[in-house]
Image (tube, helix red, strand yellow):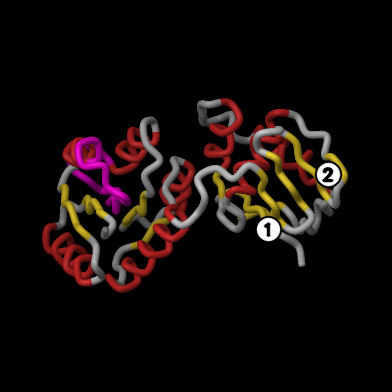
């Protein structure tokens, strides 16, 4: 069964172009032209992925993403004509899985869709033990080991490590990690994540000047890598 993609784009010519490429790639496509219509269709149709323009009438795309994230983990790829890096970072922190800047190649967008669906649909839902080289994260047992030695982690540190170990290589924004720690993310508190990351690096034996496990993606957040 083909994946269902909801395309939310108020520029109708662009929406038709994107729809054509996606349908040629074998996807079923739904369309919405406003933010409110997007929320309604997302709730009614339960798409497998949403392509969401930021500049929408009635309701901004960032507001739509925030509303979706309160009730769903549907993958979101954001489309933006905005040049400010802060808009892209905010989109990722709100839980977008990827973003594409206008103007873009429709073939590139289809490739991004495939990649995001591969990540989100091709993984086990909740593995009991996450193994990344010498690092093991026991989800049910709420403990982690490195080279067989237990890591003395606080609940917040474990929550961050579990989230990042579930998606190695993926960049997590500070607000997203903050939400994993306390259930709600409030701007102004996201820098507390830096302190947790500092402690995690120390416990993983990372050199703070040249970390190998938890890598900083400047202006965005952090990602977990497995050292060679």
Could you tell me residue 227's position as x and y percent? 76, 62
Identified at 50% across, 45% down, the residue is 125
* The N terminus - image quarter: bottom left
98 lies left or right of 50: right
Tell me how far mark 2 sits from mark 1, CA to CA: 15 Å
Q: Give the mark, 2 or 1, whose residue is nearer the N terminus.
A: 2
The residue beneath circle 2 is 202
- Where disc 2 sits, the SS reads helix
Whether residue 2 appears in magenta in the rendering, the answer is no
- Where disc 1 sits, the SS reads loop
Residue extending furthest toward the right? 149
Residue 1 against residue 178 in the figure, above or below: below
Instruction: Report the front residue among 20 and 15.
Output: 20
Instruction: Report the front residue among 123 and 58.
Output: 123
Could you tell me residue 192's position as x and y percent? 66, 32
Could you tell me residue 27's position as x and y percent? 24, 62
Identified at 36% across, 44% down, the residue is 74
Numbered label attached to residue 30: none
* The C terminus - image quarter: bottom right
Numbered label attached to residue 225: 1
Instruction: Report the front residue among 82 and 134.
Output: 134
Depth check, mark 2 against mark 1: the one in front is: 1
Q: Give the range drawn in magenta.
A: 42-60
């Amino acid at each position: 069964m083909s994946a269902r993609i909801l395309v939310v784009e108020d520029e109708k010519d662009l929406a038709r172009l994107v729809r054509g490429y996606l349908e040629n790639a074998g996807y079923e496509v739904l369309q919405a032209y406003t933010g409110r219509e997007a929320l309604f269709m997302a709730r009614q149709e339960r798409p497998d992925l949403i392509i969401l323009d930021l500049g929408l009438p009635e309701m901004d795309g960032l507001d739509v993403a925030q509303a979706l994230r309160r009730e769903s983990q549907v993958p979101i790829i954001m489309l933006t004509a905005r040049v400010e890096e802060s808009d892209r970072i905010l989109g990722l922190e709100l839980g977008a899985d990827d973003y594409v800047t206008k103007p873009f190649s429709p073939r590139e967008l289809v490739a991004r869709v495939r990649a995001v669906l591969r990540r989100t649909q091709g993984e086990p839902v909740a593995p009991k033990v996450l193994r990344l080289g010498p690092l093991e994260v026991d989800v049910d047992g709420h403990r982690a080991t490195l080279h067989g030695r237990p890591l003395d982690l606080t609940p917040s540190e474990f929550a961050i490590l579990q989230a990042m170990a579930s998606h190695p290589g993926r960049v997590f924004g500070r607000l997203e990690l903050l939400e994993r720690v306390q259930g709600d993310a409030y701007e102004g508190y996201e820098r507390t994540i830096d302190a947790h990351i500092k402690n995690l690096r120390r416990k993983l034996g990372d050199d703070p000047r040249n970390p190998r496990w938890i890598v900083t993606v400047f202006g965005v957040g952090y990602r977990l890598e497995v050292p060679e």
